[in-house]
Structure formats: C-alpha cells, structure tokens
Amino acid sequence: KQEVTQIPAALSVPEGENLVLNCSFTDSAIYNLQWFRQDPGKGLTSLLLIQSSQREQTSGRLNASLDKSSGRSTLYIAASQPGDSATYLCAVPTGANSKLTFGKGITLSVRP
Amino acid sequence: DAGITQSPRHKVTETGTPVTLRCHQTENHRYMYWYRQDPGHGLRLIHYSYGVKDTDKGEVSDGYSVSRSKTEDFLLTLESATSSQTSVYFCAISESLVNEQFFGPGTRLTVL
C-alpha cells in the first residue's frame, strides 16, 4: 500500500528565506507526483505536476524535483513571502485509475 | 482554473437524513473523484468514476454511493447521514491517468 509522508507538519520562517519542503513515498512505481497548495477553508490548488520521466519542474518561484528511486520529492520555494503561507500537500497516483494518495501536508507560515 | 463547481457549498443536516452532493465540470474530463478531508486523516478517496456510468469504490466508501449519468455531473449520496460523515468533501477531475487532478472548492457538511 502506498504511503506518503511529509515532515515536518508545520514550519515557520522569516520572509525572504529559501525553503525546501519534503515528500517521501513508499512505492516508487509512480508515473507522476503532484504538489498542491491549500489555503485555510479553501480547496486545493495544483502547483506542479512532475512526471516520472522528469527530474524537475518549475513554475515561477517554485521548483519541484522527483527522485523515484529514493522515493522522494522536494518543493523548493525561492524568496518566500507572507503570501506563501498555506498548507502544501504532495500526492501520488495509486492503482489502475490514478486515485491520489496524499501526504498530510506541511503548514507553512512566512513571517513578515 | 478548471471549471469545477460543487453544490451545496455548506450543508447542515440531521442524523439519518439522505444527502446528495453535486459536482459539475465544464472541462469534459473523463475521470472524476470524490474525496473527504478530515483533521488527522488528510484527504481520502471515497469513490471515483472513469466514464459515464462507470464508477468504483475508494478506500472509505462505506455509507456512500455515487452516480454519473452525464460526463459533466458526478453525484455523491449519503443514504442515511451519520455524525462520522461530518467532513469537507472535495470533487476532482482529470483528463487522463497521467494528467493533473483539479479540485473543486469543496462542500462543508455537518451532520448533527
């Protein structure tokens, strides 16, 4: 059974720091990994989808990497801003119909 | 943003009553999913659909049923709501197995 872990559960940093959020998964037979952002009381916003054939994917200040063999992905946030404060979740598709298995998320707080 | 709406957005109901939640998409995507999100458990799949009239169970399907009579609509029904079904329910869509999943805004359901 696929398990997805995100540690730590919460993180507080001063504005301007470069951040790395980690995601690990137990079954490396995945064909992609998706990172989401969730603001309090809101839905999930897709940030990046990284295919298994890719090693990195970039969108603005965000960069996601994927290492299937070690079962790890990282989300790099450059020059963090208070507006980046949110919960970040990673998810991998599981089974024949791509049912997503989610980590429990990392709640990020960026202090002004 | 992907065209996904959920209705109602908030609902309070009593134990034992039937409840139907609706997910509507304008993207003509084949795959549709229902998840629930609970503190301490994260997001878990309830049911999913891989085409009109084609549905299957997820990991927490007990007490729920679904129907998909049209590509654009995916209904989640609680036949007899219980307090343990108090949760936030999210619908998601995906064009294919290797594409991103996009999430709706969620429905907050409270069962008293």
Image: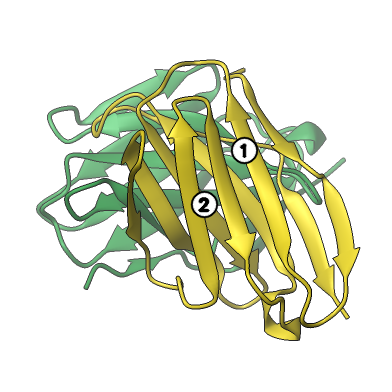
Q: How far from the left and from the top, in percent, is residue A85? A: 75, 44
Viewer-proximal residue, A89 or B55? Answer: B55
Q: What residue type is labelled 2?
A: Trp
The local secondary structure at tag 1 comes to strand
Q: Name the residue under label 2.
A: B34
Determine which residue is flagged by label 1. Answer: B23
Rendered hue of chain B is: yellow
Q: Which residue is pictured at 75% across the width and 73% down the height? A: B86
Which chain letter goes with mark 2? Answer: B
Image quadrant of residue B58? bottom left
Same chain, labels 1 and 2: yes
* Observer-nearest of B89 and B19: B19
Q: Where is residue B82 in the image (x, y as percent from the top left)?
A: 72, 82
Answer with left or right where residue B9 lies relative to residue A33: right
**Dot 1 surroundings within 10 Å: few (below 14), some, or many (20 or more)?**
many
Residues under numbered marks 1 and 2 in contact, where contact means CB atoms less than 8 Å apart: yes
In the image, is residue B40 above or below residue A98? below
- Kindly identify which numbered label has been placed on residue A112: none
Q: Where is residue A38 in the image (x, y as percent from the top left)?
A: 67, 45
Q: Position of residue A60 (x, y in %)?
A: 53, 16
Quadrant of image for the C terminus of chain B: bottom right
In this rendered view, identify the residue nearer to me: B36 or B15.
B15
Q: Which color has been applied to chain A in this rendered view? A: green
